[in-house]
Amino acid sequence: MTKHTYQITIGETGNECGHVYTSEHVSDTAAIRAAKRMCSEYHGDGWWRVECAGATVARGGRAS
């Protein structure tokens, strides 16, 4: 299986920049799952964005 490099940005509502993480996953779905898992630390007050090759794959959370 080929892994793709994703940029996952996680932030709290009110923090427009967020924290950027680079990780490798086998699919968009796996990267989205990782983003949601990282965002859960904000207990419903966070947002996330997943990008691959410069394109937004998905985004979600409070500020989506």
Image: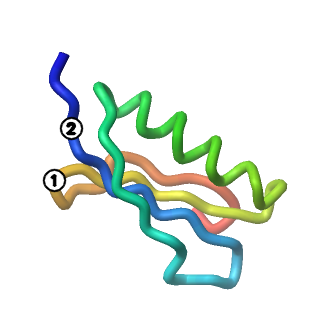
Q: Residue at x 42, y 29 (%)?
A: 29
Name which residue type carries label 2. Answer: His
Left/right of residue 49 with respect to residue 7 in the rendered view = right
Residue drawn 47% across and 63% down? 9
The kind of residue tagged 1 is Ala
Is the residue under label 1 in contact with that under label 2 (CB below 8 Å)? yes
Q: How is the image coloured?
A: rainbow
- From this viewpoint, which residue is outermost toward the right? 43
Residue found 42% across the figure and 38% down from its top: 31
The vertical placement of 55 against 63, above or below, is above
**Secondary structure under the numbered disc 1 in the rendered image:** loop
**Quadrant in which the C terminus is drawn:** bottom right
27 up-or-down from 54: above or below = above
Tell how many labels.
2
Q: Position of residue 10 (x, y in %)?
A: 55, 63
User: Measuring 63% from the left and 68% from the top, which residue is drawn there?
Assistant: 63
Q: Which residue is mark 2?
A: 4
Q: Residues within 10 Å of mark 2 (few under 14, many from 20)?
A: some
Asked if residue 29 lies left or right of residue 7, the reply is: right
In which quadrant is the N terminus drawn? top left
Residue at numbered disc 1: 53
The quarter holding residue 21 reads: bottom left
N-term mark: 2 or 1: 2
Q: CA distance from mark 2 to mark 1?
A: 9 Å
Badge 2 element? strand
